[in-house]
Image (cartoon, rainbow, N blue to C red):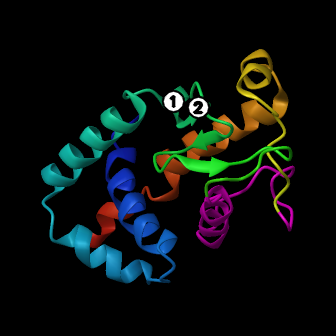
Amino acid sequence: MNKRCIPAVVFTLIYLSSDLSGRVMAVAAHGEIIRQLSEDEAWQIGELVFRNECGSKDENLVAWNEGEDFISLGIGHFIWHPAKNGKIFEESFTRFLEYAKASGEKIPSWLDKDPLPACPWDSRDNFLRMQSDIRLTELKEFLVSFYREAFSGVFAVYT
């Protein structure tokens, strides 16, 4: 992950943890939180979060963990269920996509639907076999781009 992305990780976590709790908070309020950190502190926190959540690897932004019936996406491990899944856990990927769209991100066309389609891979085994699926490639590229570029101007809050 490039250096522009590290403060975006911090920013995104702050925003999404608030948003996913059901409160709608203004981006400006989160800018105030970021503004309280030094640039070095933001980098250090972002790097630690990225290392902890993704092993410092972009490819770990998309994961289907052993023993789980759903895919986990992004730094926030947003859950996305396949159609057949009983949906024991709340699906959070929908809210992430809503936030990304509101932030001006270009969503892959196959995801930019209302309602969001079910996860196209019905199991971890299917997900692992389908690594060359164009949808999976686009999903990975979207998430990497989101964390690299969506908030490339985060440091503007320092000026």
Rounded to the nearest angstrom, the CA distance separating label 1 from label 2 is: 6 Å
Asked if residue 159 can be seen in this view, the reply is: no
Which residue is the site of mark 1?
A: 60
Q: Amino acid at mark 2?
A: Ala
Left or right: 7 as drawn, with respect to 117: left
- Eye-nearest disc, 1 or 2: 2
Q: Residue 28, position in %: x, y?
A: 37, 82
Q: Which mark is residue 34?
A: none
The secondary element bearing badge 2 is classed as strand
Q: Residue 12, position in %: x, y?
A: 42, 60
- Seen in the picture, residue 46 relative to 92 is either above or below; the reply is above
Residue range of the region highlighted in magenta in the rendering: 90-115
Which residue is the site of mark 2?
A: 63
Q: Is residue 142 magenta?
A: no
Q: Quadrant of residue 13?
A: bottom left
Q: Residue 68, position in %: x, y?
A: 61, 34
- Residue at point 47% right, 73% down? 21
- Seen in the picture, residue 70 relative to 89 is either above or below; the reply is above
